[in-house]
Amino acid sequence: MSRLARCERNTKETEIMVELDLDGSGEYDIDTGIGFFDHMLEGFARHGLFDLVVSVHGDTHVDAHHTVEDTGIVLGQAFMKALGEKKGIARFGYFILPMDDALVLASLDLSGRTYFAFDADLKAERLGTMETEVVKEFFMGLASGMGMNLHIRQLAGANTHHIVEAMFKAVAKSLDMATRIDERIDGVLSTKGVL
């Protein structure tokens, strides 16, 4: 069973195309027009072992906000589409990822119900051309786009680059865990019978 998705979103602010293979090997082709964001999505794909293509034309002459937030939404929609009815998936995922001084916890549930919690202290105002306040917006969009309960918490760290990169990788590792097929699961992992 192939778990592939292609999603697009076109507005006056952004034109976004995402292609996702949940059962890939971490191959990627990313172009958002924001160098640091590209770097984060490349790490996300590689460490989650997702094959990912992301192409974005956004209003980066204004700032990074629309490009980053909308990409999160579309990527979330691609995950939701690729998962289909979510039959056989582990559903829950978590990871505590160290990156030099940074230590970040990510925990998630592919429940179909959106909830988002974010606890971090990002001291630098920007990384490259990307404002650090949009990091939260990306993950909020991702959670919203796929109906996910997502908690991200910074446990340690002072270097903003390390903290943010640890977030992207921790969420990727958690999603890899949650989207894996477990042959023991009959249908979906819920007493409701639906996710």
Image (cartoon, helix red, strand yellow):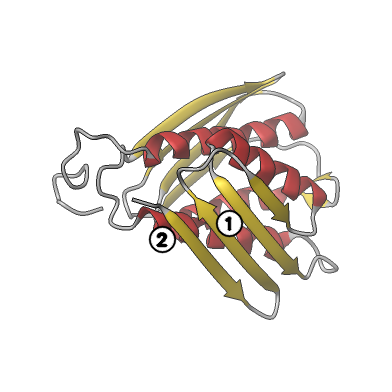
144 relative position to 186: left or right: right
Neighbourhood count class around disc 1 (C-alpha, 10 Å): few under 14, some 14–19, many 20 upward: many
Residue under numbered circle 2: 81
Assign a secondary structure to mark 2.
helix
- Of circles 2 and 1, which is in front? 2
Which residue is depicted at the point 81% across and 49% down?
35
- Give left or right: position of 37 versus 48: right
Mark 2 vs 1: CB contact within 8 A: no
What is the x, y in percent for residue 42?
68, 43
Q: Position of residue 51 (x, y in %)?
A: 56, 46
Compared with residue 12, is residue 33 higher up or lower down, i.e. above or below?
Answer: above
Nearer to me, 49 or 77: 49
Mark 2 vs mark 1, CA separation in Å: 14 Å
Say few, some or many: other residues with alpha carbon within 10 Å of mark 2 (under 14 / 14 to 19 / 20 or more). some
For label 1, the residue is 72
Q: Residue at x 34, y 54 (%)?
A: 113
* Residue type pointed to by label 1: Gly
Q: Amino acid at mark 2?
A: Lys
Figure quadrant of residue 107: top left
The image shows residue 87 at horizontal and vertical percentages of 25, 48
Q: Under tag 1, what secondary structure?
A: helix
Q: Residue at x 30, y 42 (%)?
A: 89
- Residue 52: horizontal and vertical position, in percent? 59, 50
Q: Splitting the image into 4 quarters, where does residue 150 fall? A: top left
For residue 150, side relative to residue 50 (left or right) = left
Q: Residue at x 33, y 55 (%)?
A: 112
* Total count of labels: 2
Left or right of 176 on screen, residue 138: right
Q: Sequence order check: which comes first, mark 2 or mark 1?
A: 1
**In this view, which residue lies farthest toward the front?**
1
Is residue 42 visible to the viewer in this orientation of the structure?
yes
